[in-house]
Image (tube, helix red, strand yellow):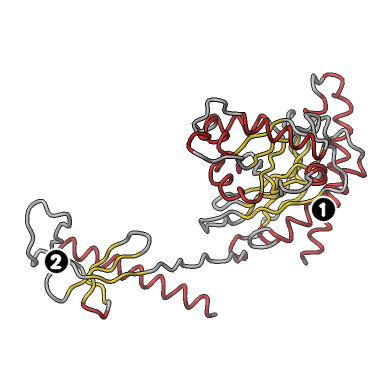
Amino acid sequence: MDGEKCKEVKAQARLALKALKEHSERISRKALFPEEDSALFISVKYKKVPLARGNSMRKLIGLPCTDQNASNTSICLILPDFERSNAAVRDPDVDGQSRRWAQLLREKYGLTGEHIAKIFTITQLKREYGKQADRAKLANTYDIFMVDKKLMKIAVNFLGGTFRKATKMPLPIDSSVDISKKLKEAFSLVQLHFAPLKDSVAVRIGNLSQSLAELDSNFDVIIEAVFAHLPGGPSNIRSCYLQTSATKISLPIFVDFGPSDEVLLEQPKNEQFAVELGECSTLPEGLMVKVRADGKVTVVKGNAGEEVLYPTAQDEWEQGDDIRPLNDDTLQKVLRKKAIRMSKGQRKRKDKAK
C-alpha cells in the first residue's frame, strides 16, 4: 500500500516538475537573479502533529544531482579554540585564533577562501553572536555550516531554534584530519528535519535551471526518505506540494483526506528521575520530603514513600510560611485532579497493552 502511494506521488511529481520548469523558462528573462529565484522545494504536511517534546530528528540525504558547488555556495566552519585560558577568552583580537585556523588549513590541505567563506572558533562565535537576532542574521549569511564533532552538542544548544527553523544546523566534521572531502560532500547534502510540535517539513530539491531528469532523481531520493522516516509513517501524510522560493508557486502533487485517527504515533516515554528521601525539621514526626532530580519536592509518609498532601487547614502553620495550607475546597480540587490524572494513566496503559 505504501509502495503504491509512493509511486503515485512520484508520478504526479513528474507532471508538476515539467510544468514548473516550462513556466520557469518563460519568465526567467524577467528575473533579476534567475538561479536564486528558481530554487525548488517539496513541502509535506502531516495529518497528526508529533506531540512528543524533546529532541528533534534530523536525517541527512545525499542528492544524486546537486546544483551547489564552491562557486555558488558558501561554507562556514565552527572549530575548537587553540587556547582556552581566561586571557585568551578576553583577548580583544576576537578572530585571532580563527586566522590561525585559516593559515593551518591553507598550509596543510590547500583550503583557501575559495573553499571556506568563514571560520569561527566556538569562543568567538559566542562572543560575537550572543543575541538571538544576531544568530538569525548569521543563519542567513552562509549556506552551509560545519562544526567539529567534539563541539557538536555545544554548537547545537547555542545556535538553537533559529538554525533549526532555517534548516541550517551544522554538519559534523573532524578537524584533526583533511576535511576537503567532507566539504565537497556537504554540497550534495540536504537536511530532513522532523521537529516536535510542527505540522510540516520542507526540503530543497534543487533548482529549476537543472534538467528534468536531475530534478526527478533528487525528488525520488527525498520522497523515499520522507516515507521511511516520517513520524507515524506514510499514513501520516496529509498533502505534498512542490514550491518555488521567490515566485511562491505551489503545486499540489498528493492529498489524502483520510482520518487522522488511523495514524499511530509513538508515545513519549515518561522520563525517570533520581529521587532522594530526607527528613525536614519543619515537618511533623513521621513525614519526610522526597526530592526529584528535576527539582520537584513532595511530602511523603515515612520510608514507605506514600505521597501525602501537606499542609492542610488542620495542620499547624504560621503566617509567612512558604507552603500555604489547603482548605477543604482546595483539597477536594487537588484530589479530583489527581484522580483524573490516575485514570488517564490507566487508560493509556490499557491502550498500550492492546
Residue bearing the label numbered 1: 221
User: The N terminus is located in which quarter?
Assistant: bottom right
Within 10 angstroms of label 2, few (less than 14), some, or many (20 or more) residues?
A: few
Residue 103: image quadrant is top right
Instruction: Identify the image quadrant of the C terminus.
Output: bottom right
Q: Which residue lies at the image location 84% right of the left edge and 58% below the top edge?
A: 7
Residue drawn at point x = 14 percent, y = 60 percent = 325
Q: Which is closer to the viewer, label 1 or label 2?
A: 2
Q: Quadrant of residue 213?
A: top right
- Where residue 241 appears, x then y in whole percent? 74, 44
Mark linked to residue 281:
2
Q: Secondary structure at mark 1?
A: helix
The residue under the point 53% across, 34% down is 88
User: For residue 204, what is the image quadrant?
Assistant: top right
- Establish if 179 lies above or below 134: below
Q: Residue at x 56, y 55 (%)?
A: 55
Type of amino acid at the residue the image marks with label 2:
Ser
In this rendered view, identify the residue nearer to me: 324 or 182: 182
- Callout 2: SS: loop
* Residue 221 in the figure: left or right of residue 353: right
Residue 259: image x %, image y %?
Answer: 62, 60
Marks 1/2 in contact by CB < 8 Å: the verdict is: no
Label located before the other in sequence (1 or 2): 1
Q: Is residue 262 above or below residue 75?
A: below
Residue type at the position of mark 1: Val
What percent of the width, then of the height, locates residue 155?
58, 44
Residue 64 left/right relative to 159: right
Q: Is residue 287 left or right of residue 180?
A: left
